[in-house]
Image (spheres, rainbow, N blue to C red):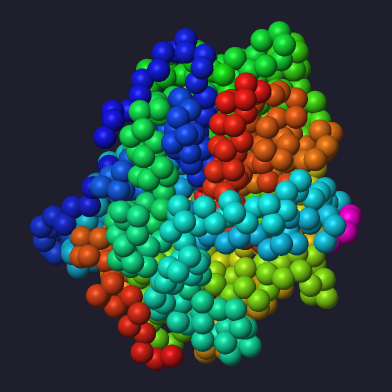
Amino acid sequence: MATAAKFELTDDSVVVIVGTGAGGGVLANELAQKGVKVVALEAGGRYMPEDYINDEWESFGQLAWTDPRTTSGDWRVAKDFSGLPAWIVKAVGGTSVHWAGASLRFQDHEWKALSAYGAVEGANLLDWPLDAAEMAPWYDKAEAKLGVTGVGGRARLPGSNNYKVFEKGALALGYKDVHTGNMAINSADYDGRMACQQTGFCFQGCKWGAKWSSAYTDIPRGEATGNLEVRDHAHVARILHDDSGKVTGVEYFDKDGNLQMQKARVVAVAGNSFESPRLLLNSHSSMFPDGLANSSGQVGRNYMRHTTGSVYATFEQPVKMWRGTTMAGIIRDEARHDPSRGFVGGYELETLSLGLPFMAAFLDPGGWGREFTTALDSYANMAGMWIVGEDMPQAENRVTLSETEDKFGLKVANVNFSDHPNDIAMRNHAYKQGQAIYKAVGATRTLPTPPYPSTHNLGTNRMSERPEDGVVNRNGRAHDVPNLFVSDGSQFTTGAAENPTLTIVALAIRQADHIAKEMAAGNV
Amino acid sequence: MTRLNKQGLTRRALLSRAVAAGALAVAGPGFIAAPDAAWAVEVTAISEHEMATLLQMARDIYPHDRVGDRFYAVAIKSYDVTEQKDMVAEGIAALDEAAKKAGFDNYLAAGWEDDRVAILRSIQDTPFFQTIRGGLVTGLYNQKDIWPIFGYEGESFSHGGYIDRGFDDIDWL
Ligand SMILES: Cc1cc2nc3c(=O)[nH]c(=O)nc-3n(C[C@H](O)[C@H](O)[C@H](O)COP(=O)(O)OP(=O)(O)OC[C@H]3O[C@@H](n4cnc5c(N)ncnc54)[C@H](O)[C@@H]3O)c2cc1C
Ligand code: SF4
């Protein structure tokens, strides 16, 4: 194994990637495999499976992004978790350390939401400049990389207690497309990673490495090529450009808080959907007074977080939902687009469990008294599911620069979000169905639980055919700046009903191919 | 920070100095303790009345009848510091005032949970209430020792996960 590369700060032949999560981590490895020299800058530290802590709050303290952020809008998160709009990771591997592994392709029509649904009042719908046929081969590669179950000849995971309750209720209601999902969690040894041991702390980082994360797959493999250098505790403050409007490098604060400047031939931004637009906005200059790559005014806009919510239910007898894989269970029947239900787009229902400490924090934030505590008293008899549906992009749901500054003196992201009526109609439908599912198995009580701080963050640098409609083109390349790319979930034009990461990974693999070709051709 | 002393206070010593402070805890100079002396918390910065009131408040906010007072005591012990003294004093004074309006001598003098909960509802939007409630979410539920009471098993990695230990053992469906 070659030792990881080390590049000079003055080396202007490298691709600099900001963030090493699902998007940035995969892009870094894919480029390194193609012989492209990469410096990946990651604000967080580096933790491996042996470091992960199977304790919810302790793990949160180890991995979560807790730098300041501010919130506004009428979403309940702004009231209950005003400083924590999202539950995401600050570490090498990004939120792919936390994620549960649900890996679904978009449905074909979801690439063309505006055409499929028609204009929706108050929504800023747009068709992706990509389609299902074009993405199919990239999805194939992404599924093979992640080892997704239920496709490519890989067996699905076995069903846990929580799944069995969910499945029985779903079948009783007549749902057909019900199974343990397409999971980036090994059901058998695959690609040097072992099979899932059903330990049940998928959100805290998989200590067995059974779940895919860029932290212990793509990143070390990229480093092994000798083409990738990952610098952790490197917080990028600003992207720099020259008089021609091309980016030339980035300024970042290193481990010791010193400001460094890394030159670059190409910069790819993959800091998740709050930090990526924040970085572009903080990189304003006399040439780009509204922020880098923002001639459209779309940087930060159209923030999407999926229409979510949970349904928990208590039963006469124990379920022990915490045992086993957190999210291996899905009902897909409601994912279709069927406006007769009173909303456009669709939603997935997926099994979910939280440990007792997180259940106490998230079941009914702010709630107290016996209505709350008697539910927790039945914790062992509880089953749970999560709703994930397509939410509407809205211009005013957006990330802007807050007046609050972080420890480096950089303006932090303010996240403004309010539900669209379509989101509310969808959530209410899903609550009703979720409760009916559990009642069909004898639930003694059902608990329609409000959305948590966002785990899926999308759309704030969206992809568009026309430069005036979005920030990046079909390759994630900034409309305004030829050697600047966006490589994370913020490029999403619309959110679809599916968990986003498989699509983020497929786009990153595709983008690596594009960047390498453009570099070879001297176009960038 | 959260010191809970299961010290060997004799029943006699306790009772001789005890003042009734709600149904559940006994306050004496410098400490509050369970009436059976199974546990006691030292009180340093705030008064015994304040500590006993906080304890009752904690129970009334998150009542779990199978969770003993000692766990609630741990959850609120961190308020017994100089920096919190004024916040606690003002908050409890306002709570007792609200109790008076409801016809009780003070909060602890309301014997039924329903009455105390009604008093709490009347102050639930105050920063004091929200601070105490918010702190309990982690202060109470993140105590590993209470998890077994709820059946929660915590980490399983050190036992090899649940693959051979019942991840799919449900038998009543
Ligand atoms: C609990 C949980 C469960 C989830 N489950 C699923 C699931 O089952 N299926 C699914 O598809 N998705 C799931 N997700 C979502 C998934 O994790 C994200 O969609 C995905 O990781 C996003 O990838 P990203 O590249 O956009 O950002 P991230 O993976 O968040 O990576 C961004 C990285 O950039 C770094 N960074 C940010 N700003 C800077 C800066 N200025 N300088 C340097 N570095 C910076 C951050 O520290 C971070 O490491 C889940 C998320 C959570 C929190
Ligand atoms: S349940 Fe499986 S995937 Fe989840 S953390 Fe445990 S071993 Fe990893």
For residue B122, side relative to residue A52 (left or right):
right
x and y percentages locating residue A165 in the rendered image: 47, 82
Residue drawn at 30 percent across, 48 percent down: A49
Residue A207 covered by magenta stretch: no
Residue A118 covered by magenta stretch: yes
In the image, residue B115 above or below residue A103: below
x and y percentages locating residue B54 in the rendered image: 40, 54
Residue drawn at 76 percent across, 46 percent down: A129
Give the mark count: 0
- In this picture, which residue range is highlighted in magenta? A117-121
Occupied quadrant, residue A115: bottom right
Occupied quadrant, residue B62: bottom left
x and y percentages locating residue B143 in the rendered image: 31, 57
x and y percentages locating residue B119 in the rendered image: 56, 62
Query: Magenta part mainly helix, strand or loop?
Result: loop
Q: Split into 4 quadrants, where in the image is the C terminus of chain A? A: top right
For residue A378, side relative to residue A68 (left or right):
left
Q: Does residue B156 appear anywhere in the picture?
A: yes
Residue drawn at 38 percent across, 82 percent down: A318
Q: Nearer the viewer, residue A210 or B125?
A: A210
Residue furthest to the front: A521
Q: Split into 4 quadrants, where in the image is the N terminus of chain A? A: top left
Q: Does residue A448 appear anywhere in the picture?
A: no
Residue drawn at 33 percent across, 75 percent down: B167
In the image, residue A262 above or below residue A149: above
